[in-house]
Amino acid sequence: MSTREDILAGLAKAVIDGDPDVSKVWAQKALNAQMDAYEALTKGCQEGMKVVGDRYTAGTMFIPEILLSAEALYSAMDVLRPYIKVQSTVPASVVIGVIEGDVHDIGKNIVKMMLEASSVKVYDLGRDVPIEAFVTKAKETNANVIAMSSLMTTTMFKMKDVVDMLVEQGLRQKVKVMVGGAPTSQAFAQNVGADAYAVDATEAVKAFEKLMKGA
Amino acid sequence: MPEKTSLERVVDALSFRESDRVPAGPLVCGASRRVLGITYAQWAKKPELTAKSLIQAQKLLGFDGFLLLTDLSVECEAWGQKVDYPMESTPITMAFKGDPLIKTVEDYEKLEWVDAKKATRMKNSVQVASTVAKEKGKEVAIMGFVYGPAGVLSMMRTLEKMSLDLKRNPSAVKKALKVVNDVLLDYTVQQIEAGVHAIVLDVLFASRFIWSRPVYDEFEGQFCVKLSDECHKRNVPVILHNCGNATYFDTMTKWYNPLGISFHYLPDGISSLEELKEKWGKKVVLLGMMDNPNVLYMGDEDLVLRESKKQIDALAAGGGFLLCSGCEFPPNASLLNAKAMVDACKMYNPYKKT
Amino acid sequence: MFGIGISSGGSFTDAVIMDLKNWHVVSKAKSPTTYNDFSLGIINSLDKVLSSSNVRPEEIGLVSLATTLATNAIIENKGGKVSLILLGFQQSDMLISKPENARDLPVHNIMSFNGGHGPDGIEICPLDLDAIEDGVKRSKDAVDSFAVSGLFSVRNPIHEMTVKRIISRHTNKPVVCGFELAGKLGIYERTVTAVLNARIMPIVERLIMSVKAAMSQRNICAPLMLVRGDGALMNDAVAMERAIETIQSGPAASVIGGKFLSSKEDVVVMDIGSTTTIICSVKAGAPKIDESGATIAGWKTRVRAVDADALGNGGDSWISVDSMGILKVGPRRVIPLAFASKDFPSLKGKMQQFETVDFFSASKAMRRPDAGGLSQKLFDAVLNLEPATIIEIKKELKSTPVDLLIGMLEDSGYMARIGLTPTDLMHVKGLFTLGDVEASMLGTGILAKRLNITQDQLYEKVWDLMVQKNALRLAELQTPLGNMIMENSEKPNPAVEILDSIIRGSLGDISVSCSLNVPIVGIGAPAQFFIPQIAERLKTESIIPQHYEVGAAIGSLVGNVVSTFDLLVRKEVMPECYVVFPGRHVFSDLESAAEFAIKMGKEEAYKQAEKTGAIDIEFKVKREDKVFSKIGFMWSDIRVTATGRPALESKELK
């Protein structure tokens, strides 16, 4: 019989190694050992994802490895999800997407993964997302944050349109805005009226948490 | 002494000689459509218009080299990958919009050799090369463009899917890469025969934020090297392009032995322009590295001039440097900013002996 | 030539006649405000001020009026039936946009149609003209007016204009478009503005008609102007169209008057009225304006108005003793005993019977709750005829949570509180005589007895609290704290407590001092009793100018006619161009775009200023380019302001 510590370490390692089969087994073991599913997710899988994020930033893990980690994360989550009591600790939700005209979404997907790993409810609109879709989805889901990214210089101005749209519809107080993507910067975020900018996925999670605390 | 031609100037730079001034390569491609006054879709689809736009843009702006890049979906179209042609934006593979040619791992195996000569978009590109070479080949440097095999394959599958596949089903991916590379080899040869002076190979995935070095070696290097070998055999200079972040200059030079590298960001492990010049400036010709979004797109001419001066100051000494945009000149940026790069090379001339 | 300025406030309607050449006050008068029909009080004061001077009606070249009529109508939810047409925005969207706690829109019906624009001023969806026409036909006979509001109409008003045209093909009833009244983003606020405007138009029109009739009977054929919420003037025709812009008219007139009388550019104006106290700062000659729009009766509008604070302690602040036996003044506002006793002659008897000064009464202005149940019972049994004490109410309602019910009824405005106030103390001291002095004396006696002090001591204590509270509120407003303190927030705020101690001169064992770096101008009848003391605590100069007691009436006459027009120049890419809004005027370079925007702004502002009754129009252009290092130009906000003097006219000129 594995101890609680073994299970958490096992989950974290399976996520870091990017092995969906192993992570599923550890998730099942957690359930068998009567562990709290939420704890298994946050203290096991999420800890693993944090390491993955740090390693990507440090240049010791790469896109293929990260995608495998994500699959491992999701396969453990699939096992654990039915047993997670609806927690008031599930802090917030975010609508995420790559802005209209841009189809580069790897960065966005990594941010999505990291946010999901932190128990944030993520509504992913994918890429080439029309500006109205961000606002409509935020309204429909009552999301706390809109996170948008753009890698192409030609589409950056659309981000201001999303902010204007929120102001026009009276949602600016309710919905925070985060921007990211190579051509954006802190200054750019401020100027289009966004609340936060993040340089990479790890920073995005931090920025998100900060926004939620401020709210 | 009469002014040198653009071609002579570029040859000097590629030979590590200080020329009459630093050559300017703003890599004006899609942006040239605005000189002729046509839509992006027309520009990308009609080779005679593509060529005419490029030539007119060169006349207008006076840059020293042509880069014959239309977009990154030229090669993949040969296998039947659907491509979207927005009226005023870069054509884009439908794989990025949910319609990839390779839908399952099995589909890799179905990829077969195709005749580059009969593939519409590649054929068009060769026609552009031939027209531009005929009209401008004696005065201006002409660089052909080939997207590396891994890049082309990703345009039919998406990078994420392909990245997972290569972990789970490496042999299927490699089989497809071989097929793609064979066709790219034909395409390279056709461009050379059309009269380009050099071949630019785009090897985007050799970046710390995409693939590790071993994965790169295994899934692009070992195939793509055939393209550079062919160029070397024909005495055609190879220039690499990689606009990714933290790129692997070491891995790239190891495989392709390029004459120059065109780049947007500082390579992996290098933290300043000075360090770059010191470590790499004698080994490869540096083509870079004007910041596309922040300077060329968002900035004005003043900023472009200032940035250009900074780079010339740091990188031009002893030749071996072309002032280039980090990637294709932003297709919708002000053309005055491209002009400003050329002006900068004329104004800040470290080679002028007083 | 002479002008008459009139300001009808909470209790009094003041009037002045000024010589328009040298701005000297020739005559002044005060008469009670008549709530049931404002025009009576206004006409009374007009007669009074005319009869107390030698000025002949023929010499009057301008009559200008600041009135709380529109504000009151909105608070009391009066007005015509409005049909609201939304374009590209659904009724359900309105609910999402609606701030929490905001009241529902007072509309007869809402129709939503396809249409509206994007942030780039490009049509999202074409108008469904047939459906709109059908809708208009169906509701035109059931309503008094229409309000039209479209998504991003500030960027492109074409849809609102088209719908307005369609409506006027079928009916002559007024149509108000969102973009006509507000040039800023925020469809919810623009819609509220348009709806409220459409609703109160007939009410303001009625007042204007009565006053104009009275003027012509008295041989005055000068133009009639109304004071806008930002202190500028507009003629009667425009005021009828843009009735909503007269909200905050009173405070605006106070600030403008205070500033004018002080002849200073940087001051804080404090208008201490018999009911409320208004505080507003003036910088570089201009009152502080709430650019995001005034909030009225829980409705957030986009009406530019003076950012006047009404949270200071005024004449109607409630003097009470809490459970610890500590004397408090405010923050609750109540009806002074002196005034309540005039409405309810039995009040004095009840005060003696129950030995209390605190009563509840059915609100004068409001309807009865129609919900039935407990509140109905309360009104029928207790409040029907006369005010009741809490003991009587508890007796009637027995086990019900009385406090909760009272709170609800008070919040919704059905019920009002009566109590001892500073206004009563001023009656006792003989500073005021309008109300029932006996009731005030009786109340002061009862409370003094409860506290076991003399009436004079009570007076001193209340005075000290009033001065300190107002000094504190003024200080809050001059710091970032001002915006953070909400009305009726009962929670003690540590920052405010510290500020309070600073004003009092010591923070624990440390002596501290603070001084306000601008003078305080006091206007309003009780100003002379308070302002010097408030200024002393804040270590600044106090200015009590001549004619301070009719400062607001003067302020309603000295304003200019102003019209502003907001534009936006936006950079777009794909292909690169510069676009001027409203509308969508495309240019290839920034300077041509900006030049066009300024020209268009001047034309529009000029047209509106002229229509509003201005002559000698001058322009001020404010252009703010948003340009950033690295990013470059993104957009430019342009505001064109056209300012002129009111065009004068009199019988003699004719």
Image: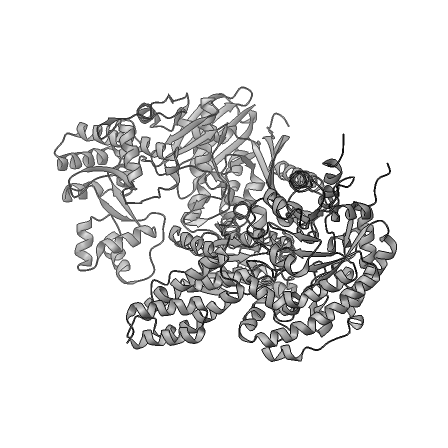
Where on the picture, by quarter, is residue B242? bottom right
Asked if residue B127 is positioned above or below residue C39 in the image, the reply reads below
Q: Nearer the viewer, residue B39 or B256?
A: B256
Q: Is residue B111 left or right of residue C252?
A: right
Q: Residue at x 77, y 50 (%)?
A: B65
Residue C646: image x %, image y %?
58, 31
Q: Position of residue B289 (x, y in %)?
A: 65, 48
Q: Is residue C15 visible?
A: yes
Query: In the image shown, does A202 or C436 lie closer to the viewer?
Result: A202
The C terminus of chain B, quarter of image:
top right
Q: How many marks?
A: 0
Q: Is residue B250 above or below residue C236?
A: below
Q: Residue at x 76, y 32 (%)?
A: B353
Q: Is residue C531 left or right of residue C579?
A: left
- Residue B331 can be seen in this image: no
Image coords of residue C529 (percent x, y): 31, 25
In the picture, the quarter occupied by the N terminus of chain B is top right
Reply above or below: C273 against A138: above
The x and y percentages for residue A105 are: 56, 62
Q: Is residue B75 left or right of residue A140?
A: right
